[in-house]
Amino acid sequence: MADPKTLETFPNPASHRDYVIAHTHHEFTSMCPITGHPDFAEITVTYVADKTCVELKSLKLYFHGFRNEGIFFEAVTNKICDELGAVLRPRQLTILADWKGRGGITSRITCTWAPRKRR
């Protein structure tokens, strides 16, 4: 299982400005929780950093932590969004997961992170 504690950050070198950072992982793999077959996706993380940016090797290792996890497309995309959001606390964050076709169907899941408002 992926561990968000593996995500490392570094100070945003231009925190005075909004600029878009986009990282794409072309070989994301998780497992179908029903069949146990591998699911393949291209995951794009797009964000506007506030105080911190994600370090890429740690992001890659975090993504690799899903390889043997049985999890639905929707769940893994939302989990990545929630965990990156919690670590980075960005001004804006979107996760786009383009899932490879199986049985003639492709799927695209898009999640946007926002800090939770206190009730």
Image (spheres, helix red, strand yellow):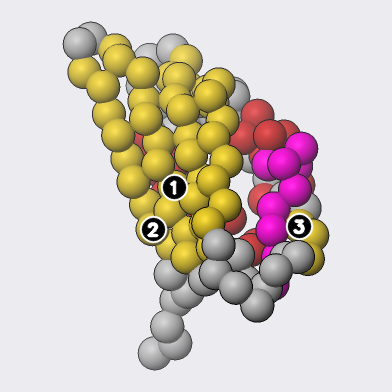
Position of 110 with respect to 88 (left or right) is: left
Q: What residue does disc 3 label?
A: 9
Q: Quadrant of the C terminus?
A: bottom left
Distance CA(mark 3)–CA(mark 2): 20 Å
Q: Which residues are magenta?
A: 51-59
In whole angstroms, how far apart are the C-alphas of marks 3 and 1?
A: 18 Å
The circle drawn on residue 112 is: 2
Answer above or below: position of 96 versus 8. Answer: above
Q: Is residue 6 above or below residue 113?
A: above
**Mark 1 vs 2, N-terminal side:** 1
Residue type of the residue flagged with mark 1: Ile
Determine crowd level at label 3: few under 14, some 14-19, many 20+ residues with C-alpha closer than 10 A: some
Depicted 10 relative to depicted 61: above or below: below
Q: Is residue 54 visible?
A: yes
Badge 2: residue crowd in 10 Å (few <14, some 14–19, many ≥20): some
Query: What amino acid is found at the position of numbered circle 3 in the picture?
Result: Thr
